[in-house]
Image (tube, coloured by chain):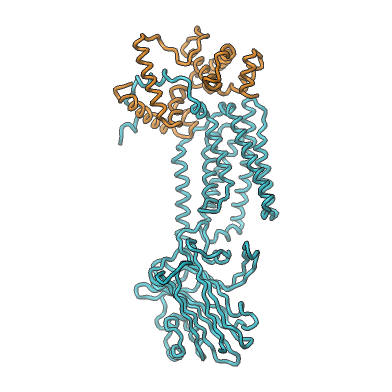
Chain colours: A cyan, B orange
Amino acid sequence: MDDHRLDFKQQPDPELEDLLAEGLSAPPEDVLREVTPWRRAMKRILIGLVLGTITWNNWNLNFILPAAGFLLILLGLRVLRQENAFFRLWWYSLLVQAGLYAFQLIHWAAPGWREFDQTAPGRAVIGVGLALEFLQFFCLWQGLRRVRRKAGLSPGAGSGLALLIFYCFIFFLGLFGLSQIGWISFAVMLIIYVCIIRGLFKLSRELDEAGYGIQPAPVRIPDLPLALGLAGAVLAGIAAVSLTCSPLPMDWQPADPAEHSDLAEVEARLLELGFPEEVLSDLTRSDILSCADAVRVEVDRERHSLTMSWNDSTPKPLTMIHAAVELAGERKSWRVFHYFAWDSGTQFYGSEAFQLWTLYDHMEGGWRKLVDPAGRLLYDRDGTTYWSPYHSLGVEAYTTDSMFFGVQSYSDPMASFSFPQNGEHCRGYVTYEAEELQEGWLLSSWINYVHQQKRFVYPAQTAREWQMSGAWNGDGLPFFRIQTAIQFRPYT
Amino acid sequence: MGESEIIQLIRDRDHRGMDQLLLHFGPLMRYVIAPILSDGRDREECLSEAAMRAWDNIQQFDPVRGSWKGWLTVLTRNTALNRARGRRDTPGELTENIPSPAPTPEEALLRQERLAELYRALSALSDRDRALIYRKYFYMQSTDQIARELGTTPRAVEGRLYRLKKQLRARLGGDSHG
């Protein structure tokens, strides 16, 4: 180790020391501004407060800026924490809030955080966080009054009180569901907020002289290592939670090679009618048996790319095969299969999902549901085929709010699942049965398949949640939607 | 009350000016005095003495040459240094530089050259580093105080000062130079 690092006072240079000690005259203005125990700490706190309110939804800045703001407040306040009782109280509440905030930042990396926030512990975390927020604004106001009073000035610090009242107002707006304010109201509130913050900066400048009386508290860790350490710990937590929790839990098990034994006759009949062989080999025993009375098979096969702007040379790693099997009976009924198969080498991150627009829901009046959607997932590894039921498959009711179409409610079958990273030939299917109510209706069954194409999505969102949010499709997004269907007129 | 109003009151020999000076700039003056004088009573006496000097020498303050805060800082520091060195017998003397034994003309010339070099070297430092040097050698703040105010550890301050002095030595002509 460098000896200089052990003792910085080694190799004293008396002449330089003497020159510095006796030669320095009036400090330049920048030094006069810099040398104070108050300005730097208070500036950090005020900038932190401003950053904490900026909501810029691009590049995760709506998380990064408030987190940076929180860090700045922490660094600024730790210097002022021993100055008076209110700054001390603020410091302790900030430490508690730091723990809660770190927890929130990390838990937003886990799918299901929205559900957690609706639970009692989740609500408690949010409630305590809000209460601490108000306590801190109160402490800021009262702490500034104490600093002024200590310097013999009138207490004042009205801008601190204004900030507290402003946040109370915002809180009650949100509490009573009035968050959807108009542009004019928003502009007025923004102007008020800017005036308050400007007032706080002005107050801080006014307190520059009084601030020389501040007694800064000692710290054990310098600012930069502390900031980097805290940010690093939170980022490591986010990465760990994201990596471990993002794939949905699946129940993979080796497929039974004898599953299709004694089904040869039905399979032969289906193949003869044109049923795709690769789909047939992946169906469950019960799904094959449900087609025992097949009289007709219609098939549609497509390859899909993962980009909006594709051409002939664009890779198309997803094969979609739609099959509709007409079953014998008094009334015509059809069993619809939507089969998807990914090329080996496709990267899977987090979750996948699909939404069905079934015959009976989207061709209402012409078709009636006979059998609910069901299906399974499969992949191969080292010559063995594994299968799993879906993580979830059922009807989901949800609403979307779009600029063009307003608030709309939907209720559709949706599936949510994950494929393993090391799986080959990942594939799956969903099937349901519908009965014809009126002759002449189009057979039209849609599947909206959502593929996650980025590893980190923050805050965490599953493919299912993305689809239910009504998000628009586009290149470069964490998710990509492939919309495809089988459509034909059964009587032509 | 603003800075210019306080200065005007003092110039007008209005005693309210002295009250306002102590009210608004007392914390700054105490801040400058504290690292130089350790005794509490000594500090209060020094504060009164510095305020009296400001009152007596207000005509020397020229806003064109520097800020009020700078003038008051230098005046207070010199008062505290004089007090610390037991030089109460030279109260009326106010210089920008620390009093030192009278050098020979050659020594004075050499010193002027070195000081000019030092200021050139200081001006090449960043604002923050320059402020650190001033904290240590002009304000005479302890490493502990500097660390507290900068939100860092004394060890980190010592390290930074060590490296800055090394830089200054190099700019002033190497280790052999002062």
Q: Is residue B121 visible?
A: yes
Q: Is residue B144 left or right of residue A54?
A: left
- Where residue A256 sits, quadrant-wise, is bottom left
Residue A279 on image: x %, y %: 44, 81
Q: Is residue A147 above or below residue A281?
A: above
Total numbered labels placed on residues in the image? 0
Residue found at x 55% / y 66%: A467
| Residue lying furthest left | B176
Residue A366 in percent (x, y) is at 63, 83
* Residue located 62% across and 27% down the image: A150
> In the figure, A458 relative to B162: above or below?
below
Looking at the rendered image, the quarter that the N terminus of chain A falls into is top left
Could you say which quadrant of the image residue A4 lies in? top left
Residue A391 visible, this angle: no
Residue that lies at the very extreme toward the top in this rendered image: B89
For residue B169, above or below residue B112: below
The residue lying toward the viewer, choosing from A44 and B70, is: B70
Q: Nearer the viewer, residue A101 or B78?
A: B78
- On the rendered image, what quadrant is the C terminus of chain A found in? bottom right
Compared with A442, A97 (above or below) is: above
Residue at 61% over, 30% down = A206
Q: Residue B47 at what x, y percent from top left?
A: 56, 17
